[in-house]
Amino acid sequence: MNVEDSIWDKLTRVVIGLCLLAGLVAVGVWYLPLIRQNEAMRKAVLKLDAEVEKESETRRQLSAQVELLNNDTNAIIRVARESLGVAKPGETVVHFEEAKTNVYAPR
């Protein structure tokens, strides 16, 4: 005897499928804020990594300057002359000022 599915069996399968679909959508909606938060945190980490790299480069430059000043007396003399405007007897110190430019004034 060939028994066909009744309308209730078909409706039961449809309802079960819709319940599973609704469950998947609910899980997706539940985790969506966490996914967005994770994305924002990853962007922040990338920004901080770039900042760390920049600061590391600055540290390397400053370490090189400190090493140079610790080992080279001519470097110390040059820095003192540039920053303090000190000159040896008989030398002339020349300071260059930035040129003033004409500012365009609207009529």
Image (cartoon, rainbow, N blue to C red):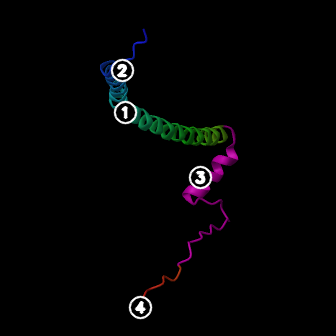
> What residue sits right under mark 2 in the picture?
13
The N terminus is located in which quarter?
top left
Which quadrant of the figure has residue 67? top right
Q: CA distance from mark 3 to mark 1?
A: 60 Å
In the displayed structure, 29 sits above or below 82; it is: above
The image shows residue 60, relative to residue 92, as above or below, that is above
Of marks 3 and 2, the one in the foreground? 2
Q: Element under label 4?
A: loop
* In contact (CB < 8 Å): disc 3 and disc 2: no
Q: Mark 2 or mark 4, which is nearer to you?
A: 2
Q: Can you tell which of label 3 and label 1 is closer to the viewer? A: 1
**Distance from the alpha carbon under mark 2 to that under mark 1:** 29 Å
Reading the image, the residue beneath label 3 is: 80
Q: Mark 1 packing: few (<14 Cα in 10 Å), some, or many (20+)?
A: few
Q: Position of residue 45 (x, y in %)?
A: 48, 35
Q: Which badge, 2 or 1, is on the more N-terminal residue? A: 2
Q: Does dot 3 land on a helix, a strand or a loop?
A: helix
